[in-house]
Image (spheres, rainbow, N blue to C red):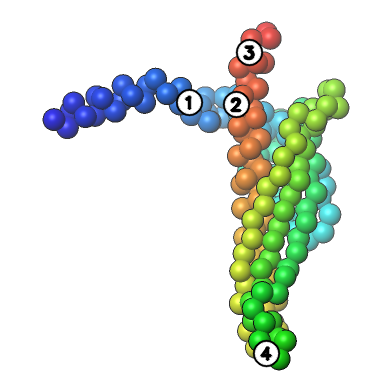
Amino acid sequence: MRAVALVAALLALSGCGLRPLYGGGAAGPVQTMLAAVQVAPIQGESGWLVSNALRDRLAAGRTDAPRYRLEVQLDDQIAGLGVRRDDSVTRERRTLRARYQLVDLSSGAVVLDATAGSDAGIDVVGSEYATIAAERTALERLSGIVADQIVARVARFAQSAAPAAAAAQ
């Protein structure tokens, strides 16, 4: 009975068009394109964190000649949420939003224009040092999350562009 259910599930999934995103490994079309992305400088501390996370995830610099440039503008904000009767803040929300564009260096055309973002809650405690440390930790965590979102979207673009590039050849 289990074997029949397994065969039925495999048959159902085989017709869904599901393809692995990183099919082909390091030499596959998605990894090849991700390695050909140059990350433009991003302003500020959050920009430094996001650009480093992007370079790590894209394996930037693996190819000698980049074909694309990733331009990112960040909006990093902290807002007080929990307020006591004496108007002191007890909880903050740190929000990191990114608008990014993938530019084809050969034509200068923007081939992908999208946004990414996340937020984190921060407890404000009596120690100012602890609050600053929590805000920094939240920024580091958010930078990684936003970088993951950007790379995932660029990888999906690369996957959809790969069949078009193969058909053009």
| Residue 1 locus on image (x, y percent) | 13, 30
Q: Earlier in the sequence, mark 2 or mark 1?
A: 1
Give left or right: position of 158 versus 72. Answer: left
Q: Earlier in the sequence, mark 2 or mark 3?
A: 2
Q: Secondary structure at mark 3?
A: helix
Q: Nearer the viewer, mark 4 or mark 1?
A: 4
Q: Earlier in the sequence, mark 4 or mark 1?
A: 1
Report, in whole angstroms, how far the alpha carbon at label 1 lies from the one at label 3.
16 Å
Quadrant (top left, top right, bottom left, bottom right) of the C terminus: top right
Question: Within 10 Å of the Cα at label 1, are there few (<14), some (14-19), or many (20+) other Cα atoms?
Answer: few
* Residue receiving disc 3: 166
Are the residues tagged 1 and 3 within 8 Å (C-beta)? no
Are the residues tagged 2 and 1 within 8 Å (C-beta)? yes
* Residue receiving disc 1: 19
Is residue 127 among what the camera can see?
Answer: no
Are the residues tagged 3 and 4 within 8 Å (C-beta)? no
Report, in whole angstroms, how far the alpha carbon at label 4 lies from the one at label 1.
55 Å
Q: Which mark is residue 159?
A: 2
Residue, x 71% and y 44% (percent of image)? 115
* Residue receiving disc 4: 85
